[in-house]
Amino acid sequence: MWLRPNRVLSRRGLRRLIMVLATLALMTAGLGAWQGDVFAPLFALIEASAMAIALSVAWRAGDRSERITLDDTSLEVQILPGRRCTRFQPYWVRVLLESGEGRYRLLLSSHGRKLEVGAFLAEEERAELFRKLRALLADFQTQQRR
């Protein structure tokens, strides 16, 4: 499974949005300067720069993803872009849905270790992932018993 946050804007769309918002801010500042507020363009430039940085940081946060792989020997969760990888023995791993911090957390637990997965997903998506993981692991465990 490949988990990714929902992202509507492409890089090109983000640039266009920043340009439109910066243009509107500078046009408003130009109107203010025309009416006597000489500091309006300076504050508009500061605002446009801060807005562009904030939107870019938020957009880059959408690059994170998680890849969950189940095979005969391990359940592997690879967190990208950091390339952090955590492995569990699939026969012993448990899927938990715990409440905490005002939301439900989806946890994989085995041998005293816990790992939260899908933190960037919406509540409904996290609940669906919980059901899918439990079904996959139950199928795997019944196959191992045979």
Image (cartoon, grey):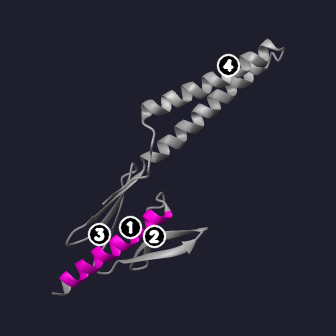
- The residue at which mark 4 appears reads as 27
Residue 19: image quadrant is: top right
State the residue at coordinates (61%, 68%): 102
Pick whichever of labels 1 and 2 is earlier in the sequence.
2
Pick whichever of labels 2 and 3 is earlier in the sequence.
3
Q: CA distance from mark 1 to mark 2?
A: 8 Å
Task: Classify mark 3: helix, strand or loop.
Answer: strand
Q: Nearer the viewer, mark 2 or mark 3?
A: 2
- The residue at which mark 3 appears reads as 75
Q: Nearer the viewer, mark 4 or mark 3?
A: 4
- The residue at which mark 1 appears reads as 129
Q: Are marks 4 and 3 in contact (CB under 8 Å)?
A: no
Please name whichever residue, 131 or 120, is drawn nearer the observer in this view of the structure.
Answer: 131
Q: CA distance from mark 2 to mark 3?
A: 15 Å
Pick whichever of labels 1 and 4 is earlier in the sequence.
4
Mark 4 residue type:
Met
Q: Position of residue 80 (x, y in %)?
A: 38, 51
Q: Nearer the viewer, mark 2 or mark 4?
A: 4
Q: Nearer the viewer, mark 1 or mark 4?
A: 4
Which stretch did the figure color magenta? 123-143
Q: CA distance from mark 4 to mark 3?
A: 55 Å
State the residue at coordinates (45%, 70%): 106
- The residue at which mark 2 appears reads as 106
Q: Position of residue 129 (x, y in %)?
A: 38, 67
Mark 1 residue type:
Leu
Q: Tell whether position 14 is magenta.
A: no
